[in-house]
Amino acid sequence: MTPHRLEVADVFRQHAQEFFTRWGHTLSAPQRKVFRDICACRTAALGARFEQCNYCSHQNIQFHSCRNRHCPKCQSTARDQWLDRTAKELLPVPYSHAIFTLPGALSPLVRQNAKLIYNLLFRCVSETLLAIARDPSRLGADLGFLVVLHTWNQKMLTHPHLHCLVPAGGLALDRSRWVHSRKRFFLPGAVLGRLFRGKFLALLAAAFRRKKLRLEGRLQPLQRLETFDRLVRSLRKPKWVVEVRAPFGGPEHVLKYLARYTHRVAISNGRLLELRDGQVTFRWRDSADHNTQKLMTIEAVEFIRRFLLHVLPPGFVKIRHFGFLANRCRAEGLKLSRTLLRASAQPDPLSVRQRHAIERKCPGCGIGTLCLLGYVPAHLLHSSMTAVCAAIDSS
């Protein structure tokens, strides 16, 4: 029998009471929902379903998933389905990966104004890339690209940054041809960083003037104009980090690359090593030390607090498209790009195992499809999760 592997849900369940005693009064409704969903995911608390193969009659019972986008166990199927759709939108050209990061000094502001700051971040990054690429001295083309928001670093602390996957080239401004970038160079990171910094600080100042920012607790001094202006001036001095990696691979490499970024959560179950005496030990990568793998041990309650810092606002879209891949013009932009590039059909982006999973293939014969026979409601299944969920609701 395979031994149980430590999961985020184990930490949540074992230390729920201690966590809510210390931090329950600070949690938002979405954070409480994420906590409850992760605890209940794939347990009897959510009920189960009976399935049978339509070819070999193999039967199995499977607990329901919570399908919360913050749950570490619910991302693989969502990711595979998304990759399957996105494969049709990839172009037969190399791609470049650009990362735009907000300075750490803005982290307290982000925690109180997450939705506003994240929307500003998307806007400034997209406008920066589009403006620099349209410059005839740089590329002289219209880009189409995908952007993914991550809000954490390897220690699960607040670290908002955007991963941008950009075809290494674009449509000529007159739409007559495809403009290729240089093989080893896409766009200058320093130039992007300066324009990104200017745009973001200008929009942040405008939000302050319109009284759109929440400035409470330790941020109350920033309610004064002179104090806020001092913060903005201090942020104009340092360079803002924009990393632009050289163009790499084609569509098949890009899909594997995408899978590492699109449906991540603050920490995966695979990084957890031990839960003992109220302490959680996990692996992290130290980028300041040549990406060396290291171990970190923190209190379980602090682990939960850090994880819940990264719950996104309800309905917030964390994967967005811009340029000629924006929703309103994607079909036309892709059609023109493929015509100019003489693109052929793309290979299947998924492995056999991934394809079987999203098509609900039978694990017994691998030929038939699992069909639903019926549901088992939660109240008919014994579960220790009932008490945990009740404690969350009453706290």
Image: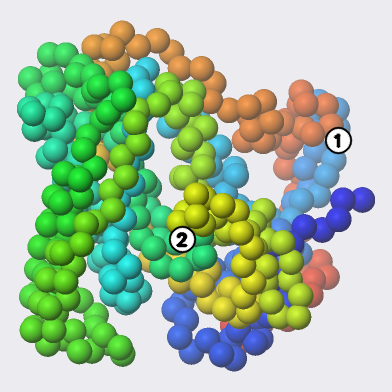
Secondary element type, mark 2: loop
Res 184 quadrant in image: top left
Q: How is the image coloured?
A: rainbow
Res 222 quadrant in image: bottom left
Q: Which is in the foreground here, disc 2 or disc 1?
A: 2
Q: Which of marks 1 and 2 precedes in the sequence?
A: 1
At a point 13% along the width and 21% down the height, the residue shown is: 172
Point out residue 152 in the picture as x, y percentages from the top left corner: 44, 61
Residue 153 marker: 2
Q: In the figure, is residue 63 to the left or right of 320?
A: right
Point out residue 215 in the picture as x, y percentages from the top left corner: 24, 83
Q: Give the answer, above or below, for where 257 lies relative to 196.
A: above
Q: In the figure, is residue 313 to the left or right of 220?
A: right
Pick whichever, 180 or 43, lies toward us. Answer: 180
Secondary element type, mark 1: loop
What's the CA distance linking mark 2 and mark 1?
44 Å
Q: In the figure, is residue 324 to the left or right of 97?
A: left
Q: Mark 1 — residue?
A: 58
Check disc 2 and give the amino acid type: Asn
At a point 14% along the width and 38% down the height, the residue shown is: 132
Residue 295 marker: none
Q: Is residue 378 at all visible to an observer of this figure? A: no
Disc 2 vs disc 1: Cβ atoms closer than 8 Å?
no
Point out residue 88 in the picture as x, y percentages from the top left corner: 42, 24
Count of all numbered marks drawn on residues in the image: 2
Q: Is residue 300 at all visible to an observer of this figure? A: yes
Check disc 1 and give the amino acid type: His
